[in-house]
Every structure is written in structure tokens, then in C-alpha cells.
Amino acid sequence: MKKLENKVIAITGAAMGLGLATAIEAAQQGAQLALVDYNEKALEEAKQFILKDYPDTKVTTVVADVSKEEEVKKYVEETVKAFGRIDGFYNNAGIEGKQAPMTEYDVEVFKKVIGINLMGVYYGMRYILPIMQKQEYGRIVNVASVGGIRGVMNQTPYVASKHAVSGMTKNAALEFGRHGITTNAIAPGAILTPMVAEAFKQVNPDDPQAAETEYAQANPTKRLGLPEEVAKVVVFLLSEDASYVNGQTIAIDGGESNSYGFV
Ligand SMILES: NC(=O)c1ccc[n+]([C@@H]2O[C@H](COP(=O)([O-])OP(=O)(O)OC[C@H]3O[C@@H](n4cnc5c(N)ncnc54)[C@H](O)[C@@H]3O)[C@@H](O)[C@H]2O)c1
């Protein structure tokens, strides 16, 4: 039996990176998909990519910016219209923002990071939790980060937003556990996605590969993670198998968040 057979799974930030990897893994596990992203072209490509390998998957796409409440309402409504229910929600869309010291951080960029990473995650839960409550069933996986557990130099709004995601996850778990809904968060370390490639360009514009190699040295595994390694944990948390896991923030980071000093 596939882990998500006939489950309806909504995924934000589904056009690339961790969202796309999870969409592929979920399709492989029998899910029907509502894919949400604000990058219309990449979203359509993601849909076609999935249908090529998994032609029996029912896929609907919604172009929406998760930082805008009206657009969140729209993607939730369109998902319910297409499938009649939402069993699982991968609340994943997020951005890193620009790297800069706290006192020099561009306030407009700060607000943008909070708007997407914090408010976007909140709006998603705000409009999907009532649907899951009516169903008396649901699985939510929010995307925090190791930056939601520890500080990260020069990334104040990102760290603030990801700590908030972890906090909101605990609250949703407390408030909705009685309705058959589990809410958990994942805290990925550095995973090789377009977002992280961009971050290495910011750290070392002349030689991003050198920045990546140096970063990997701080990890007990001496390598960065792959999107598929995150996707498998997310699918577990979205499945029946994780029925008694609730309110947790689960690090997927090769053990890096345990270290103090060199490894
Ligand atoms: N890659 C990592 O190492 C890593 C580590 C920790 C946490 N994360 C988190 O994982 C999530 C996904 O990151 P990723 O690395 O896959 O990033 P990515 O940039 O590769 O992909 C993010 C996707 O989200 C979409 N998106 C961004 N803002 C959006 C918005 N406002 N509305 C709708 N769609 C939007 C983008 O178009 C893109 O398709 C983010 O929340 C990120 O903070 C990533």
C-alpha cells in the first residue's frame, strides 16, 4: 500500500526545490496534488514533469502569492473545488531575503521575508485548519529551518520568521489535536535547492562553489542534503504512519544543529 494513496495534498512553493521534490515523492506514494506557487511558468513545468512520470496523478495548479490573504483564500477554495477535501498540507513557500547585519538590514526586505515566511504560513493554516476540522482529519507540515532553532549570521528576518513557524506549529498542535489534525514542522539544514545556490552566491559571489564546500565541512556528514532526503520525511509526516507525532519541529540536517564548534 502506498503511503498517501488517494490523499489530497496541497503544497505551496511547489514549482521547485523542496516543494517540487515533495510533490514528486507524494505522487509516487499515490497522492492527488494541488500545487501552489507564484511562479506561473515554473509551476506549469513542475506539473508536466510530475505527469510525465506519474500520469495517473490528478494535479491541479493555482498561481498565488502566499503573502496575500486573498490569494491564500483562492488557493484553498480552488483546491476544495477540485478535490472536495484537503487531507495534507505542506506549508512550504518561503524566501531567504538578503544577507546583511541586523542594524543595516533593509527594512522593506525584512517585511517581505516576514510577509511570506510568517504570514504566508499563518494564512495557510488559518484557511485550511477549518476544512480539516470539518473533516475531523488532517496533516500539516510547516517548513521552519535550522534557522528556526538557532541563530544564523546576517539573516535576522529569516531566523525570526522560522522561529515563528516553529511556535505557530506548537499552537496549532495544541488547538487542533482534538480534531484528528496533527501539525508538525521540519527544520532542514542546507539542502541543495535553487534558494541555497543563491545564498552561496551572496556569501562568495566570485566562487559560490568554494562557499558550498566550506559550508559542508561544518556538517557531520561533510555534505549538503538533497531535496529527496527532505521529501521522504515530509511524506512520512503527511501519512497515517505519523499519527501520534504532533507539535514537533524535526531537524533534517545531517546532525549539524547538535554541534558546538568543529566537527
Ligand atoms: N533549501 C534549504 O536548504 C532550506 C533550508 C531550510 C529551510 N528551507 C525552507 O524550505 C522552503 C523551500 O525552500 P527551497 O530551498 O525549496 O526554496 P526555492 O527558492 O528553491 O523554492 C521556493 C519555491 O517557493 C516559491 N515561492 C516563494 N515565495 C512565494 C510566495 N510568496 N508565494 C508563492 N510561492 C512562493 C518560489 O517561486 C519557489 O518555487 C522555504 O520555506 C525555505 O525557507 C530551505
Image (spheres, helix red, strand yellow):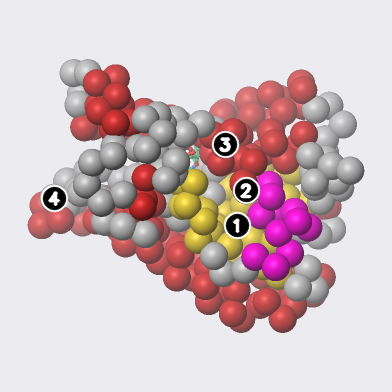
List the residue tagged with mark 3. Answer: 229
Direction left: furthest residue: 103
List the residue tagged with mark 2. Answer: 234
Magenta-span inclusion, residue 240 = yes
The amino acid type of the residue labelled 2 equals: Val
- Please tell me which residue lies in front, 46 or 247: 247
Magenta residues? 235-245
- Please tell me which residue lies in front, 99 or 37: 99
The reply to whether discs 2 and 1 touch (Cβ–Cβ < 8 Å) is yes
Question: Residue 141 bears which disc, if any?
Answer: 1
The amino acid type of the residue labelled 4 equals: Pro
List the residue tagged with mark 4. Answer: 101
N-terminal of the two: label 2 or label 4?
A: 4
Relative image position of residue 256 (x, y in whole percent): 37, 45
Q: Secondary structure at mark 3?
A: helix
Residue at 77 percent across and 23 percent down: it is 53
The amino acid type of the residue labelled 3 equals: Glu
N-terminal of the two: label 3 or label 1?
A: 1
- Number of other residues with Cα within 10 Å of mark 2, as a class: few under 14, some 14 to 19, many 20 or more: many
Closest to the camera, between mark 2 and mark 4, is 2
Closest to the camera, between mark 3 and mark 1, is 3
Relative image position of residue 54 (x, y in whole percent): 80, 27
The amino acid type of the residue labelled 1 equals: Val
N-terminal of the two: label 3 or label 2?
A: 3
Q: CA distance from mark 3 to mark 4?
A: 31 Å
N-terminal of the two: label 2 or label 1?
A: 1
Closest to the camera, between mark 4 and mark 1, is 1
What's the magenta bit mostly, secondary-structure-wise? helix
Please state if 251 lies on the left or on the right of 154 as rendered.
right
